Amino acid sequence: MTRINIYCIKTVHTETPYQMEFDPSEYYTDEHVYQLKAQIDANFSEPYNFNLLTNQTTIAVPGINIIDVNEYNLWGWWNKMMLFDESISGDGLNIYFDLDTVIQRDFDQMCDFAVKDKLTMLYCYWKPIDWEQVAYKSSGYDKAFKHSTLFNSSIMMWHGNDLQHITDLFLENLDQNLLHFRGNDEYL
């Protein structure tokens, strides 16, 4: 049986030069972590390790492994880029869920769709099929839409810890990446 590691990220927002304004809809608490874990427990029959990447938490319960990301000082979703660091990714299958994910039914079979040696992400079926070609022009050439994509990182899967190059390349040009890309979906 393949070892399964499930991850989520909760970042308590602090003032940072990369985020100009605070969006209260992006504020998640420890309660959101507990809710996600309860949904996983109710809808996943395989044994798994649960990991929380966070810069601040009061969680101290068995079954939730805390991974401190304070040293990176990244804003919210950008901490997803640290998931691929070999010190964080585990052996076996790694699965990531955003804290606003709602799991409505059994997802055991989802694991069968994790491609070996690749990062598996969601396809944004809710965006127009030509989104990548028209978003930038339709936005009036707003820089935030320059790298529009049909991928979504709310749920991701990857095998093992051999995607270190993603984290390395991101950190190598950190300032440029944070200012150039609207978010990690576009970066990935």
Image: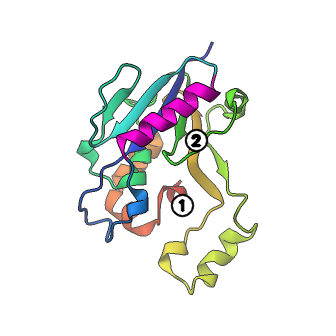
Q: Nearer the viewer, residue 171 or 63?
A: 63
Residue furthest to the bottom in view is 140
Disc 1 packing (10 Å; few <14; some 14–19; many ≥20): some
Which residue is drawn at the image coordinates 64% and 20% (left, top)? 45
Give the image location of residue 170, x and y in percent. 40, 51
Badge 1 marks a residue whose secondary structure is helix
Which residue is drawn at the image coordinates 26% and 51% (left, top)? 73
Which residue is drawn at the image coordinates 33% and 30% (left, top)? 66
Badge 2 marks a residue whose secondary structure is strand
Give the image location of residue 102, x and y in percent. 59, 44
Residue furthest to the right in view is 129
Relative to 3, does residue 127 appear above or below in the rendering? below
Image-based side of 174 in relation to 166, left or right: left
Q: Decide if residue 23 is in sight here.
A: yes
Q: Which residue is mark 1?
A: 186
Magenta span has 42? yes
Please, what is the three-letter code of the amino acid marked with disc 2?
A: Met
Please, what is the three-letter code of the amino acid marked with disc 1?
A: Glu
Relative to 172, does residue 133 appear above or below in the rendering? below
Magenta span has 73? no
Distance from the alpha carbon under mark 2 to that under mark 1: 14 Å
Relative to 125, does residue 43 appear above or below in the rendering? above
Characterize the magenta stretch by its predominant secondary structure.
Answer: helix
Q: Magenta residues, as a range?
A: 29-44
Disc 2 or disc 1, which is closer to the eye? 2
Q: Quadrant of residue 116?
A: top right
Q: Which residue is mark 2?
A: 156
